[in-house]
Image (tube, helix red, strand yellow):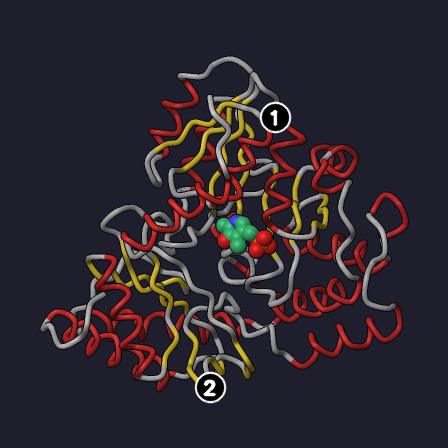
Amino acid sequence: MARIDIHDRLQGQRRQRLAQGRQRQRRTVARRDGVRLEVDGRWLTGFCSSDYLGLASQFEVAAALQDTAAREGVGATASHLVCGHHAVHEQLEREMAEWLGVPRALLFGSGFAANLAVQQALLEDSDVCVQDRLNHASLIDASRLAGCRLRRYPHLDAEGAMRQLRNAPEGAAMLATDGVFSMDGDVAPLRALSLVARTQQALLYVDDAHGVGVLGPEGRGSVAEAGLDANDVPLQLATLGKALGGYGALVAGDADLVEHLAGTARPYLYTTALPPALAAASLAALRLARRDEWRRERLRELIGLFRDGASRFGLDLMPSATPIQPVLCGGEAAALAMSAAVERAGFLVTAIRPPTVPEGGSRLRVILSALHTPQQVQALLAAIADARDRVAGGREAVA
Ligand SMILES: *Cc1c(COP(=O)(O)O)cnc(C)c1O
């Protein structure tokens, strides 16, 4: 084996991505005003953020952040177990647990870190983690970090999960799934999965990053929507960066399991606590998310409007009842061309391509927010349909 130069290797990989048209580009937002974004000197209407309830720019949420930062400073200055654990962190954990109807919740710096922590702290080499094929990247990477065996089952297939668990009868087992899938917007069959977990003595873990705040009674998420509780789902992930409009995440559920994470999970112990001001903002957001049923109602209306309009225009939708509404585009080049055309019409919608989604699954991922107006949704639909016609008719340059 010869030593490999990392720069050389990167160059080869970059060339390959370019040849496949798979280079990725960040867009810089100069200013933001609700769903309006200033990008490259133009104001666009964004249909790509996960600010489902419009809480990221809500006045009381921003005020809580400002007030707390003015009083307590910005950084937490230490990890939770040193001296970074603030009363507002504690209050956020208590109210999240109460909202979700579970005994205990633990605050993490991000959902990605929380997912790493859960498997790293609970699973060992001889254990197995059985996961939906379309689970979030952080759940997949968590199994690698834990060193356990990772077995995947076909998307939404509870029987497939059962088979994988039966095939791995030794060691402890976790069954992990997204509650709402981030690229497809569909919802995991949680009742069936909880039965599978029960019969196979597996711990069911639901990553509800996109469900909390959006689904279920009081916005308690996909677990509550499925009529399940902490006995069925011993641990779940609630993120603060999506419907709650902030940053960070909580793992919520069984007190014993959560205490174990607090005492042993490396992504919890060896990192600086979230800024207290952010926790205060999330606390304000949580209360609004819980109270403001009108935000969810508005969202449901817009989802209905979007789906009705899309079917009138003959757009290729996926079976999603959530604010994540993918429009399938055929190939990768068509998805990129449609995204560019839609942007010229004044809308920012992300084209999602392999390897993020399977080959042939390239799409525009439209994400709706309670802040959108019906007029904005109608205008978006017309722009997408026009873009599709232009691409299909060869009037739109395809890369
Ligand atoms: C966004 C997301 C995460 C990561 O959460 P962050 O707080 O953004 O790190 C985890 N799981 C799913 C399903 C997500 O969509």
x and y, in percent, of residue 68 in the image: 82, 71
Q: Is mark 2 within 8 Å of ligand 1?
A: no
Label 1 Cα neighbours within 10 Å, binned few <14 / some 14-19 / many ≥20: many
What is the three-letter code of the residue carrying label 2? Gly
Q: Is mark 1 within 8 Å of ligand 1?
A: no
The local secondary structure at tag 2 comes to: loop
User: What residue is drawn where x is 51% and y is 29%?
Assistant: 3
Q: Which residue is mark 1?
A: 123
Residue 224 visible in the picture:
no
Count of number-bearing discs: 2
- Rendering quarter of residue 340: bottom left
Instruction: Please tell me how crowded label 2 is: few (under 14), some (14-19), or many (20+) other residues with Cα within 10 Å.
Output: few
Please determine whether, in this image, residue 202 is positioned above or below residue 261: above
Q: Position of residue 44 (x, y in %)?
A: 42, 83
Tag 1, which secondary structure?
Answer: loop
Location of residue 271 with respect to 277 vertically, above or below: above
Which three-letter amino acid code belongs to the residue tagged 1?
A: Leu
> In the shown orientation, is residue 34 left or right of residue 261?
left
> Circle 2 is placed at which residue position?
41
- Out of 15 and 242, give the one closest to the viewer: 15
Camera-side residue of 193 and 267: 267
- Quarter containing the C terminus: bottom left
Identify the disc placed on residue 52: none
Q: Position of residue 42 (x, y in %)?
A: 44, 86
Seen in the image, is 132 located left or right of residue 80?
A: left
The spot of residue 237 in percent (x, y) is 59, 47
Q: What is the C-alpha distance between the residues marked 1 and 2?
A: 49 Å
Task: Write the residue at 52% across / 37% down.
Answer: 141
Q: Residue furthest top?
A: 170
